[in-house]
Image (cartoon, rainbow, N blue to C red):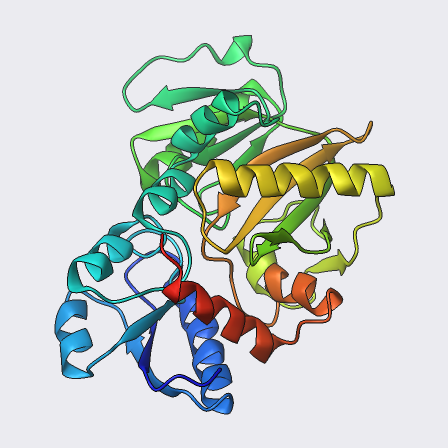
Amino acid sequence: MITEKRIGVLMGGISSERDISLKSGNLVASSLKRRGYEVVPVDMGIDLPAKIDEWCIEAAFIALHGRYGEDGCVQGLLEIMGIPYTGSGLAASAICMDKLLSKKMFEYYSIPTPEFSVYKKGTEIDSGSLKYPVVVKPCREGSTIGISIVSKKEDLHTALEMALNYGDKVIIEEYISGTEVTAGILDNKSLPLVEINPRSGFYDFTTKTSKGMADYIVPARLSSSVSEKIKDIALKTHISLGCCYVSRVDFRVDTEGNPYVLEVNTLPGMTETSLLPMAAKEAGIGYDELVEMILSSAFVKK
């Protein structure tokens, strides 16, 4: 459906994921233009309200990643300005961006997730009491930024210091040995699962955003029963955390086939190496159709 509304594609921003956001945003903008939409690419900054007014933006496709774009800040601003926007609302965006809040929600809704503890800056920690390996990650960052896998207690301090560069709270999480899998949700339905095999053994930010550094298998090489269980958990997680229309739920699946939710991405990447487009393609949904479907979520009540 071609709309007469002027679409602002919000990209870039001021987070640590600016560059990948620009890639997503430019691809989305090109796609919408091919579909016949009037599109304005908008590099988000503190002058965003002025840009929205200047360009007479009537609806926003949010292609931002990380802080200030994925955490409810932009969503709240757009609501105040009366601009419909894609993806989840303010509350769900804030919860999913905050790993501690997400973990609490997982526990409340009985969603399987690795055991964890929280480290606060300036406190003491008994590194010898942890069962290694552990995953150390900032509470409020995405795309594995600031994350480390720690195999011995001697390396814990360095990992904590790196994670603390991105906030005062750090999650120390049980490491689940097994397979990395992601489950895309589109139109509140589960897409085919994507299995991720990083060639370095660790699916970090560089691996995620670079071609040729990981192998992706779609659909994931799991039994039908395990695959369906993961899809069911992904959809339950999406709904329980209040997500709207589209999200991506990341899992680790242990050697016995037990899935554990790691986190929920409310604004999945839309580049050539991004996982949601891969899953959609397997379901018979091309990139341009996917973009237009996500755009439709701007007009869904949050």
Q: Who's the residue at 51% across and 43% down the image?
A: 264
Q: Name above or below for residue 226 compared with residue 90.
A: above
Q: Residue at x 52, y 25 (%)?
A: 109
Q: Residue at x 61, y 15 (%)?
A: 131
The quadrant where residue 16 appears: bottom left
Q: Nearer the viewer, residue 204 or 97?
A: 97
Q: Give the image location of residue 134, x and y in percent.
A: 58, 25
Task: Specify whether residue 84 is in view.
Answer: yes
For the question of whether residue 263 can be seen, the reply is no
Q: Quadrant of residue 18?
A: bottom left
Q: Relative to 104, does residue 167 appear above or below in the rendering?
A: below
Outermost residue toward the right in this view: 223
Which is more toward the observer, 23 or 80?
80
- Residue 44 position within the rendered picture, expressed as x and y whole percent measured from the top left: 26, 69
Coordinates of residue 100 in the picture (x, y in percent): 41, 29
Give the image location of residue 138, x and y in percent: 41, 36
How many numbered discs? 0
Figure check: 154 above or below 188: above
- Whether residue 60 sits left or right of residue 224 in the image: it is left
**Residue at 19% in and 82% down:** 56
